[in-house]
Image (cartoon, helix red, strand yellow):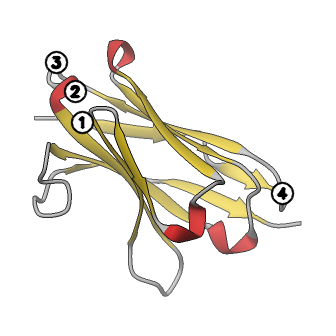
Amino acid sequence: QVQLVESGGGLVQPGGSLRLSCAASGSIFSILAMGWYRQAPGKERELVATISGSSTSYVDSVKGRFTISRDNAKNTVYLQMSSLKPEDTAVYYCKAAPKGLLLAAPGYWGQGTQVTVSS
């Protein structure tokens, strides 16, 4: 069993930055693939970024602005968000799953953290 707790969300002005954190319980963190998703009001949940080992991927809309990273010693994955836009406003969730199964497996989810980009 893996428990995930997100933090770091908040209100930020357009062009600003935030760093989200997702802390995981358990000793298997280093062998898991991790992903950040987001869901805006009235929209479907969207995969934003993934990290598996040292490999990362991003949805086109955040490439060059967001960076996903992990610290296995702290069982934590981060999402550094820069040049934020109002359309980045959403609840951000992290997900953990066995490597190769991040998209296919139910996995483990955090409770979400709200990010609001507004002036």
Q: CA distance from mark 3 to mark 4?
A: 37 Å
Crowd band around label 1 with a 10 angstrom C-alpha radius: few (<14), some (14–19), many (20+): some
Query: Residue, x 14% and y 43% (percent of image)?
Result: 99
What mark, if any, has residue 29 been given in the picture? 2
Vertical relation: 34 (above or below) 104: above
Numbered disc in front, either 2 or 1? 2
Q: CA distance from mark 3 to mark 1?
A: 11 Å
Crowd band around label 3 with a 10 angstrom C-alpha radius: few (<14), some (14–19), many (20+): few
In the image, taking residue 6 as reference, residue 62 lies left or right, namely right
Q: Secondary structure at mark 2?
A: helix
Crowd band around label 2 with a 10 angstrom C-alpha radius: few (<14), some (14–19), many (20+): many
Vertical relation: 53 (above or below) 27: below
Residue 26 can be seen in this image: yes
Numbered disc in front, either 3 or 4? 4
Which is more N-terminal, label 4 or label 3?
4
Residue on which the image places disc 4: 15
Amino acid, disc 3: Ser
State the image coordinates of residue 6 (x, y, percent, origin top left): 45, 41
Residue on which the image places disc 3: 27
Amino acid, disc 4: Gly
Q: Secondary structure at mark 1?
A: loop
